[in-house]
């Protein structure tokens, strides 16, 4: 996560600057951080562009969610995408305000916290998609209580870790005790490592689900090809893991003085590995219509609930006449049967590509 790391003891060359430290908390950071302190001429225009993009993302996702809700198509993850975009809107606003008041430490703290907190929602969404893919490929294993508890534990750790990091970063600005600062840094490094691991989890879980031989037929869900769902999820996971890995790697580097930032803390890297990769994921999920592709029937509780018959009934509640006319036939629904060429078909119940 991209937090300002706690202040560490500086070398003798910077000892003189410590005399300028305020005598009251919160204390400004002495170490460089990714992106540095935003400036009006450089950061404000760039941040304004991302602000506009995230506003568009928020409006689009909320529109999709409300339209689906009116038709009885329940897909909470569109609301979570809206929540992520709103968090990024606040982040961009806080960075613009920070650029106008660079010496205001509370604003700096708030901006850094929002940078770190927002992306957690995207991690959770990817884990939900991963869980659905595994349940479709291995229904009995995917619905096993142990597997459900595994994901529940990860979700709980995500929340607990986020709280720990927020407490650590805020505390680091309100103390001068070296041991406390060391503990705060360790907590922040742990959080960065944990979230990088979470962003990477879809790869081993999905590949494992595909490689391990299936004992039952594939349970299709949503629209579109199953292989497309896998490709969409892994593409988003790659982008998020790339950003998380870069942030984690830079945080593990030896802290440098604020006025001597290393090249890997350049502003360009901040915007590329934070806002750019995130807006790409938002655009990807909107364009491919995850609300259709990753939708599962309401009330799914065990093996067989992702079956094509139940999915067809769910679609019938909100489908228009044009979509109904394009619903696949029975042979297409039960597409794990071998075709005339001996190949396994994997078209879904219906596809937005065919509408």
Image (spheres, grey):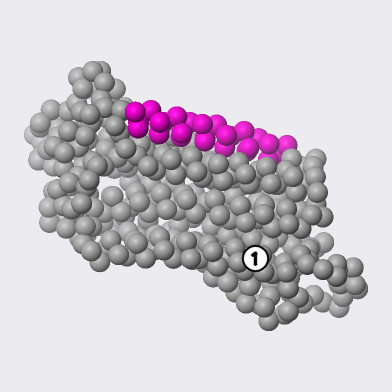
**Residue 117's spot in the image, x, y percent?**
56, 54
Front residue (pair 240, 7):
7
Q: Which residue is mark 1?
A: 169
Q: Is residue 325 above or below residue 345?
A: above
Q: How many marks?
A: 1
* Residue found 80% across the figure and 45% down from its top: 100
**Residue 331's spot in the image, x, y percent?**
10, 32
Q: Is residue 48 magenta?
A: yes
* Residue found 78% across the figure and 67% down from its top: 25
Residue 152 picture quarter: bottom left
Residue 279 appears left or right of 336: right
Q: Quadrant of the N terminus?
A: bottom right
**Residue 3's spot in the image, x, y percent?**
64, 61
Residue 9 in view in this figure? yes
Question: Magenta stretch?
Answer: 45-70
Q: Quadrant of the C terminus?
A: top left
Residue 137 in view in this figure? no
Front residue (pair 40, 83):
83
Q: Is residue 353 above or below residue 171?
A: above
**Residue 75's spot in the image, x, y percent?**
34, 39
Residue 140 appears left or right of 166: left
Residue 157 picture quarter: bottom left
**What type of secondary structure mainly makes up the magenta span?**
helix
């Amino acid at each position: 996560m991209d937090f300002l790391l706690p202040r560490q003891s500086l070398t003798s060359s910077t000892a003189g600057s410590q005399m300028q430290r305020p005598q009251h908390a919160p204390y400004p950071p002495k170490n460089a951080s990714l992106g540095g302190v935003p400036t009006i001429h450089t950061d404000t225009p760039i941040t304004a562009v991302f602000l506009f993009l995230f506003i568009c993302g928020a409006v689009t996702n909320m529109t999709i969610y409300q339209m689906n809700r009116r038709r009885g198509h329940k897909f909470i993850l569109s609301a979570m995408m809206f929540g992520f975009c709103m968090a990024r809107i606040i982040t961009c606003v806080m960075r613009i305000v920070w650029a106008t008041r660079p010496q205001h430490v509370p604003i700096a703290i708030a901006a850094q916290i929002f940078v770190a907190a927002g992306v957690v929602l995207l991690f959770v969404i990817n884990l939900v998609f991963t869980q659905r893919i595994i349940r479709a490929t291995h229904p009995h294993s995917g619905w096993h209580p142990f597997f459900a508890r595994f994901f529940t534990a990860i979700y709980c750790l995500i929340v607990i870790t986020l709280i720990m990091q927020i407490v650590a970063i805020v505390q680091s600005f309100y103390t001068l005790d070296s041991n406390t600062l060391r503990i705060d840094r360790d907590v922040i490094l742990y959080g960065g490592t944990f979230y990088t691991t979470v962003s990477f989890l879809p790869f081993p879980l999905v590949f494992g689900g595909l490689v391990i031989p299936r004992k039952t037929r594939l349970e299709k869900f949503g629209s579109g090809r199953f292989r497309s769902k896998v490709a969409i999820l892994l593409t988003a996971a790659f982008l998020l893991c790339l950003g998380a890995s870069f942030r984690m790697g830079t945080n593990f580097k030896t802290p440098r003085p604020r006025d001597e930032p290393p090249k890997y803390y350049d502003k360009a890297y901040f915007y590329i590995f934070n806002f750019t990769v995130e807006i790409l994921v938002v655009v990807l999920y909107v364009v491919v219509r995850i609300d259709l592709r990753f939708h599962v029937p309401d009330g799914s509780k065990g093996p067989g609930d992702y079956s094509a018959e139940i999915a067809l009934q769910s679609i019938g509640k909100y489908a228009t006449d044009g979509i109904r006319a394009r619903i696949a036939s029975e042979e297409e629904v039960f597409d794990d049967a071998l075709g005339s060429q001996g190949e396994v078909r994997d078209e879904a119940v219906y596809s937005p590509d065919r509408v």
